Amino acid sequence: MAKKKTSEGIEAQPPRLQGRPPAQVQQPPAEERYADQLAFLRAVDTSSRPQGWLLSPGLVVDFLCGTHGEAIRAPSSAELPAGAPRSMVIEPKFVGGRALIERSVVTLAGERGLLLVGQPGTAKSMIGELLAAAISGSSALTIQGTAGANEDQLRYGWNYAMLLDRGPSPEALVPSPVLTAMRTGRLVRIEEITRCLPEVQDALISVLSERRLMIPELEGPDGSVFAAPGFNVIATANLRDRGVSEMSAALKRRLNFETVPPIADAQEEIDLVRRRARVVLSESGTEADVDARLLDILVRTFRDLRAGRTEEGWNVERPAAAMSTAEAVTVAAAITRQGTFFPTQKDPVSLLPGYLLGVVLKDNQEDRARLLAYWDGPIRRRGEGDALWKRMYALRDVLEELERE
Ligand SMILES: Nc1ncnc2c1ncn2[C@@H]1O[C@H](COP(=O)(O)OP(=O)(O)OP(=O)(O)O)[C@@H](O)[C@H]1O
Ligand SMILES: [Mg+2]
């Protein structure tokens, strides 16, 4: 790369804006993060696989839901990558019903697409990414649904310079991830499908029913692309966005709906938030554990506000904000990070009101009052018998002060 001389005559490397990705990335895709697990599972897999799949259905489910602490042992005949262990415990990545993942896997092997619906932050995108990585070896064929998306983004576009020069030809065609997935027999992910206009979504109907995409501009065999075995669609839709009800009935019929619920068990959610926050912190260069008391109070607060009801059965006014597990992970990581950046602030719980306000106050001013009502109700009552919740109640002033800012 050419070096530039600065005014001082020192050779400076211009910032690289294009070209190869950096050696480290902020968030590698699932197939890279779990490359060792996927290579191991493929090597030990002896069950039959649907055509075009890299892993049998049972092991795909194990990859997402874990093996309950039990090790999978490689048979002596298995050819493992050099240096790979001969047995492996797969830790759960998705916390929740195994049956949901089993049904999703069954759908993907069939003739319909999969639509994961649910509240924000319930791991819909994560499930899609993990399924694509396990089944197709790549989670990269992804389209982000937006209000501005057009049909070309689901079908194909053209390299206009080449198109003008030579007319329509296979070389001038710019395939969408859907088209590439069809050609290569992989899964394609369509995130937030309901954000696309219904007429744009409908471009998928023929792809899903006929498993074929017509390219009328090209003649002969190039004019239609048939999906290779292994191709299917994983779409996600957020219930807070424009509704799935607006999807056309024709498209709905071609998708199996699976609802991804928030994590049912409080302790499971606490454990997950601890694990995920640790990973998030470690990826950003902070090796620290989340304070156990903070975790407990944080996750319980999120759960109460999300459900509109506490474990004790007290009613809580629900804020409009989603209060998702994903947000809880972010807050746990942020408070811990703040503690390592500014070690003089030793009490992590005291930072909670500020971050909670940041989560709750997204767009609805009435949510301020709801948060204060939560303080004056459940937090005050719990504080009567528990020192930590009492400490939390004492932070009401902090909350009020922050509100005035
Ligand atoms: N049940 C769960 N199991 C494992 N991780 C979870 C679970 N629920 C939430 N998470 C955490 O939340 C993070 C965010 O999830 P993800 O982005 O996949 O949610 P989403 O449902 O796609 O949200 P959105 O609707 O906002 O797009 C995950 O990376 C994970 O850390
Ligand atoms: Mg998502």
Image (spheres, helix red, strand yellow):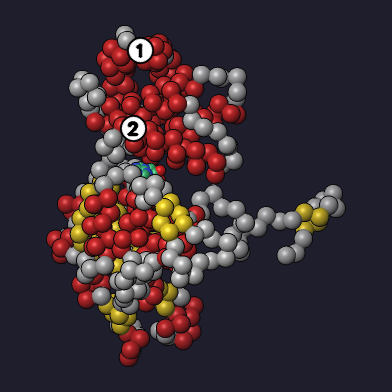
Seen at 31% across and 32% down, the residue is: 266
Which quadrant: the N terminus? bottom right
Residue 160 versus residue 265 in the image, above or below: below
Q: At label 1, which amino acid type do we have?
A: Asp
Asked if residue 120 can be seen in this view, the reply is yes
Identity of the residue furthest to the right in this view: 9
Q: Amino acid at mark 2?
A: Gln
- x 22%, y 21%: residue: 312
Secondary element at image label 1:
loop
Counting from the top left corner in percent of width and height, residue 223 is at: 32, 85
Residue, far top: 384
Task: Name the quadrant of the C terminus.
Answer: top left
State the image coordinates of residue 224 (x, y, percent, origin top left): 30, 83
Q: Residue furthest bottom?
A: 220
- Asked if marks 1 and 2 touch (Cβ < 8 Å), the reply is no
Q: Nearer the viewer, residue 118 or 400?
A: 118
Q: Nearer the viewer, residue 170 or 228?
A: 228
Q: Nearer the viewer, residue 121 or 311?
A: 311
- Residues under labels 1 and 2: Cα distance? 19 Å
Confirm if mark 1 falls within 8 A of ligand 1: no
Image location (x, y in percent) of residue 289:
51, 32
Q: Which residue is at 38% across, 55% downward? A: 63
Residue 399 lies in what quarter of the image? top left
- Left or right? Give the position of 80 relative to 117: right
The quadrant in which residue 11 appears is bottom right
- Indicate the position of residue 199 as horizontal and vertical percent values: 23, 63
Residue 96 position by quadrant: top left
At a point 46% along the width and 67% down the height, the residue shown is 76
Q: Is residue 217 above or below residue 310?
A: below
| Residue 77 located left or right of residue 7 | left
Residue of label 2: 267
Checking the image for residue 386, the label placed there is: 1
